[in-house]
Image (cartoon, rainbow, N blue to C red):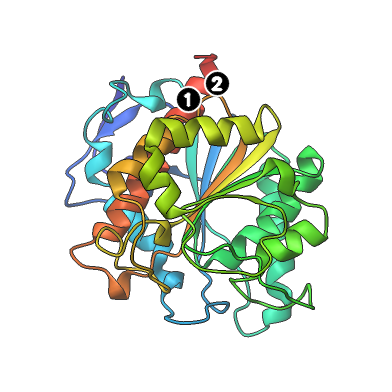
Amino acid sequence: MSDLTPGDGAIRRPGLYGSSIENTYAGVLSFLRRRYSRDLAGADVVISGIPLDLATTFRPGARLGPAAIRSASVQLSELKPFPWGFDPFDDLAVIDYGDCWFDAHNPLTIKDSIINHARTILGSGAKMLTFGGDHYVTYPLLLAHAERFGQPLSLIHFDAHCDTWADASSDSLNHGTMFYKAVKEGLIDPEHSVQVGIRTWNDDFMGINILDAPTVHALGAQATLERILGIVGNRPSYLTFDIDCLDPAFAPGTGTPVPGGLTSALALEIVRGMGPVNLIGADVVEVSPAYDQSDITALAAAHIALDLLCVMRNQKLGI
């Protein structure tokens, strides 16, 4: 189902449903050409970016990630997504809310800015699909989601890094300590949370279930998915996908790449199986386009995000 307005559907589409006719190489670059709007009425899912990279510990540049993911999505809005075979926007009302504004020159205000951004969206009843930015952004997003849905939540975390290294301060900006804080503050239940693709060491994984990269390679997609579903069950679950979960061969454009990661094909197959999860929100983070090659990292992130929207569409329809 398409509206009859050719071009620039991001600003010209009259409603939230359907897809417009676009030239892939032109037009306003919202994610998947969704309507740019701050009107949350009727939206099932709200796309937004958080262009932060002040919390990185190695290479910067993830502040440009949301723009790169939007740009990479243009081709994906042209056809029905594979392997789903439907237009998710026939049934799922999705807007692109633009980016969270924060004062990058006043770092101690950033956490509250992100929390308030999320509160506004979640207060409408819509789900959030958020683009980072570095992985720190997941911490204030978890705070807002736990406030909305109750805590502790289950966490499904795709990453090369566990991000549970100790941090004495809840106010520090560090993209390696968010889930240490989340466990300590009771935002997530480690027994019913899982980290997928890990291939860095921590002496204390804080009780979170680990499906490291060698294990995922050995198990394959379906057995890995069964392990994930068995861990989180039907509990309210937040999914966060750090693009460095993928091997640098598939995602070079990231701040802390680690060899030995998942292929894009393997990761996409796992993500596509998330239908049974009680998915309350998700993010895709750590795309750093300055280190990308031919936009392959941004393309992978856009595909992951589109598959998550297809999962959400089926969940809305009870499929």
Helix, strand or loop under label 1: helix
User: How busy is the neighbourhood of tag 1: few (under 14 within 10 Å), some, or many (20 plus)?
Assistant: many
Helix, strand or loop under label 2: helix
Examine the rendering and report whether any part of residue 104 can be seen.
yes
- Reply above or below: 233 against 27: above
The residue where tag 2 is placed is 316
> With 29 as the anchor, is 236 left or right in this view?
right
Q: Position of residue 158 (x, y in %)?
A: 49, 51
> With 40 as the anchor, is 159 left or right in this view?
left
The residue where tag 1 is placed is 313
- Residue type at numbered disc 2: Lys
Q: Quadrant of the N terminus?
A: top left
Name the foreground residue: 9 vs 123.
Answer: 123
Q: Position of residue 151 (x, y in %)?
A: 81, 44
Examine the rendering and report whether any part of residue 38 can be seen.
no
> With 138 as the anchor, is 272 left or right in this view?
left
* Residue in the image at 46% along x and 29% along y: 311
- Residue type at numbered disc 1: Arg
- Reply above or below: 113 against 255: above
* Residue in the image at 42% along x and 57% along y: 245
- Reply above or below: 313 against 64: above
Outermost residue, bottom side? 105
